[in-house]
Image (cartoon, rainbow, N blue to C red):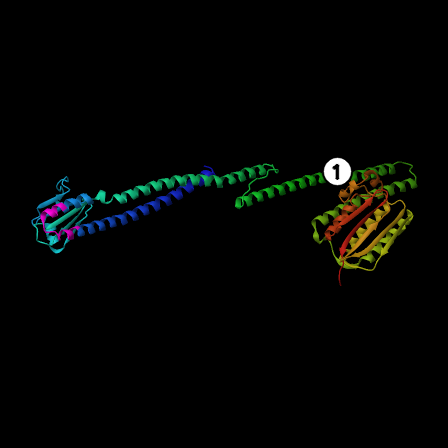
């Protein structure tokens, strides 16, 4: 049994019970009221007719009046003398009394001796009977009997009962139709949501639920659509991450393989007999250079891993940014001079920051060394300026520049704009990735603007620390 059938059965059962209960209560209440009213009206009619008979003094008039009243009202009317003998029985076509209790017996006579009216309404009687004493002795009529068949007396109650039964059956039919409609109305979105959830669970992340409703089902549909969109986005990110991870491991293998081949070749040459001291020193220097390159590679990888996994890897302190830049300039100025590059620092005041001194020195080392490496001849400037509440540090070179197609991936690990030329220059391919990792750990970003054959500008900003 699916959800629609369960809802329909539940609604039909509950509402049918309610309809039957209300109908039963209405039938009992109305029947009781109508019966009480019918009996009261019967008793009142009997008293009124008895009182009217007391005013008559001629038997012929009594007979005519009795017959007329019986025909008019539908009552069975009988007149008795003092001994209980029937004098008049109207309507005339009604047979004499079959039940002995309908006769004027001693028990009734005894009761009428103390009361003007005696009512018989026993359950085993087919009629309601009222006996009355006629208190005038002008005629020989002493007692009146008025009766009516209970079926006729209760006809109104029976008619209303039938009406209520009909209304109850009609209501139940309406309940069934309405319950089926509401069960479908409520069950349809549940089925749609179930089917969509199964499709999403099976990998169809493009599945979208088109459920235009302003209730909880509509909210759930929107939530499932958002969940599918988020899963799709996460799935795409995981795919890209997997691609980058595969590239990352391939790049590591490639980066390590080249220096290892060089070291292996140098070691083989050192094993040759008769090798001069100069050649031995040259091969040892080459091997040591490649070992240093591998060491730097794994140091950079370790640093990146620490940035990714350990937020406490950054140890902040207050220092003047301009002092740090001057130290870096002093270190790289001789190297720049060897390439006929002019390296200078454009200082515009002093600005204190709260950051990791050693890590920020590593950032500037990478940026300045890259600027020198890729500038064959020209000026390299490091500028430090205040922009709002931040200090902006820029490294500007006049080097070979970077093509626009490389800018989006420039800070990816092991990404090179020219792999062969970059390896010739001894880089690990992780310098700019380390820069980005350090700045991200400081809640800062690194930006680049570059034009091929004109130069590049790398810059970042840190909040100024107010003492």
Q: Is residue 114 above or below residue 190?
A: below
What quarter of the picture does the C terminus occupy? Answer: bottom right
Q: Residue at x 74, y 40 (%)?
A: 248
Residue 413 seen in the figure = no
Q: How many marks?
A: 1
In the displayed structure image, the side of residue 376 where residue 7 appears, left or right? left
Most foreground residue, 260 or 132: 132
What quarter of the picture does the N terminus occupy? Answer: top left
Q: Secondary structure at mark 1?
A: helix
Residue 59 part of the magenta segment: yes
Residue 38 seen in the figure = yes
Q: Position of residue 413 (x, y in %)?
A: 76, 43
Which image quadrant is residue 93 in?
top left
Q: Residue at x 54, y 37 (%)?
A: 195
Q: Position of residue 294 (x, y in %)?
A: 80, 43
Q: Which residues are magenta?
A: 49-64
Most foreground residue, 141 or 261: 141
Which residue lies most toward the bottom here?
467
Q: Is residue 299 above or below residue 388?
A: above
Q: Residue at x 42, y 42 (%)?
A: 11
Q: What residue is disc 1 on?
A: 250
Q: Residue at x 67, y 41 (%)?
A: 237
Q: Position of residue 261 (x, y in %)?
A: 82, 37
Which image quadrant is residue 10 in?
top left
Residue 150 part of the magenta segment: no
In the displayed structure image, the side of residue 71 where residue 265 appears, left or right? right
Most foreground residue, 147 or 275: 147
For the stretch drawn in magenta, the main secondary structure is: helix
């Amino acid at each position: 049994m699916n959800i629609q059938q369960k809802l329909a059965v539940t609604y039909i059962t509950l509402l049918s019970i309610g309809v039957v209960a209300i109908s039963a209560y209405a039938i009992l209440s109305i029947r009781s009221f109508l019966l009480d009213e019918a009996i009261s009206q019967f008793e009142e009619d009997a008293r009124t007719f008895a009182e009217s008979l007391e005013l008559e003094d001629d038997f012929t008039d009594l007979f005519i009046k009795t017959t007329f009243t019986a025909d008019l009202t539908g009552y069975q009317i009988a007149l008795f003398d003092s001994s209980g003998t029937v004098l008049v029985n109207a309507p005339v076509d009604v047979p004499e009394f079959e039940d002995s209790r309908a006769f004027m017996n001693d028990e009734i006579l005894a009761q009428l001796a103390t009361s003007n009216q005696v009512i018989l309404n026993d359950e085993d009687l087919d009629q309601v009977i009222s006996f009355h004493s006629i208190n005038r002795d002008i005629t020989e009529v002493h007692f009146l009997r008025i009766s009516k068949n209970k079926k006729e007396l209760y006809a109104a109650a029976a008619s209303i009962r039938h009406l209520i039964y009909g209304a109850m059956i009609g209501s139940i039919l309406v309940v069934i139709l309405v319950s089926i409609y509401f069960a479908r109305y409520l069950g349809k979105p549940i089925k749609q949501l179930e089917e969509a959830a199964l499709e999403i669970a099976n990998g169809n992340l493009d599945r979208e639920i088109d459920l235009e409703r302003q209730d909880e089902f509509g909210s759930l549909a929107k939530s499932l659509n958002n969940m599918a969109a988020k899963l799709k986005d996460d799935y795409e990110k995981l795919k890209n991450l997997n691609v980058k991870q595969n590239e990352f491991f391939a790049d590591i293998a490639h980066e390590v393989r080249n220096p290892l081949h060089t070291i292996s070749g140098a070691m083989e040459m050192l094993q040759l007999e008769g090798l001069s001291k100069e050649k031995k020193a040259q091969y040892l220097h080459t091997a040591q250079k490649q070992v240093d390159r591998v060491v730097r590679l794994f140091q950079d990888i370790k640093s990146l891993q620490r940035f990714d996994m350990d937020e406490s890897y950054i140890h902040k302190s207050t220092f003047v940014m301009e002092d740090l830049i001057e130290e870096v300039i002093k270190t790289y100025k001789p190297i720049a001079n060897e390439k006929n590059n002019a390296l200078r620092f454009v200082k515009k005041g002093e600005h204190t920051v709260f950051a990791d001194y050693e890590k920020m020195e590593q950032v500037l080392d990478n940026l300045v060394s890259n600027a020198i490496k890729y500038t064959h001849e020209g000026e390299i400037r490091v500028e430090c300026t205040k922009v709002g509440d931040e200090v902006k540090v820029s490294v500007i070179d006049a080097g070979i520049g970077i093509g626009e197609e490389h800018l989006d991936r420039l800070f990816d690990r092991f990404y090179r704009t020219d792999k062969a030329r970059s390896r010739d220059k001894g880089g690990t391919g992780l310098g700019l990735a380390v820069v980005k990792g350090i700045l991200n750990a400081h809640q800062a970003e690194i930006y680049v603007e570059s034009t091929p054959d004109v130069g590049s500008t790398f810059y970042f900003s840190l909040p100024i620390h107010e003492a």
